[in-house]
Amino acid sequence: MLVLARKVNESIIINDTTEIMIVEIKGDQVKLGIKAPKEIKVYRGEIYKEIQSENIAAAAANPPENLDDLIVLKKKKP
């Protein structure tokens, strides 16, 4: 993990396409602004974990019956 110190209105750039800027620091809370291309999905950590858990639960509830079904499911996924 890379740890950086930043002040308000300072930013970091990731892959020439994504900028993360410190917008405000108030007490123990930091507000971030994120500029990224639309194809890059940005989630809060707790929401991302919830999505992953739901995906795992859905896959367990409806497992493919054979390899052909799995291939069809994979092709449908964007």
Image (cartoon, rainbow, N blue to C red):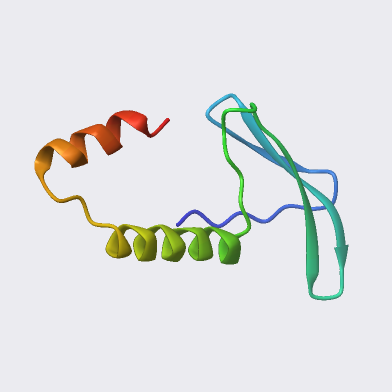
Q: Between residues 7 and 21, which one lies in front from this camera angle?
A: 21
| Quadrant of the image containing the N terminus | bottom left
Q: Is residue 10 above or below residue 43?
A: above
Q: Position of residue 58 (x, y in %)?
A: 38, 60
Furthest residue in direction bottom, as rendered? 28
Q: Is residue 78 above or below residue 29?
A: above
Q: Which of the 4 image quarters holds residue 4?
A: bottom right
Q: Is residue 17 left or right of residue 55?
A: right
Q: Is residue 28 left or right of residue 2?
A: right
| Residue in the picture at 58% in, 40% down | 41
Q: Between residues 28 and 35, which one lies in front from this camera angle?
A: 35
Q: Between residues 17 and 56, which one lies in front from this camera angle?
A: 56
Q: Position of residue 38 (x, y in %)?
A: 64, 28
| Residue in the picture at 50% in, 59% down | 51
Q: Is residue 11 left or right of residue 14?
A: right
| Residue in the picture at 30% in, 29% down | 75
Q: Between residues 28 and 51, which one lies in front from this camera angle?
A: 51
Q: Is residue 76 above or below residue 29?
A: above
Give the mark count.
0
Q: Is residue 36 above or below residue 63?
A: above
Q: Position of residue 8 (x, y in %)?
A: 85, 51
Q: Position of residue 33 (x, y in %)?
A: 78, 45
| Quadrant of the image containing the C terminus | top left
| Residue in the picture at 38% in, 34% down | 77
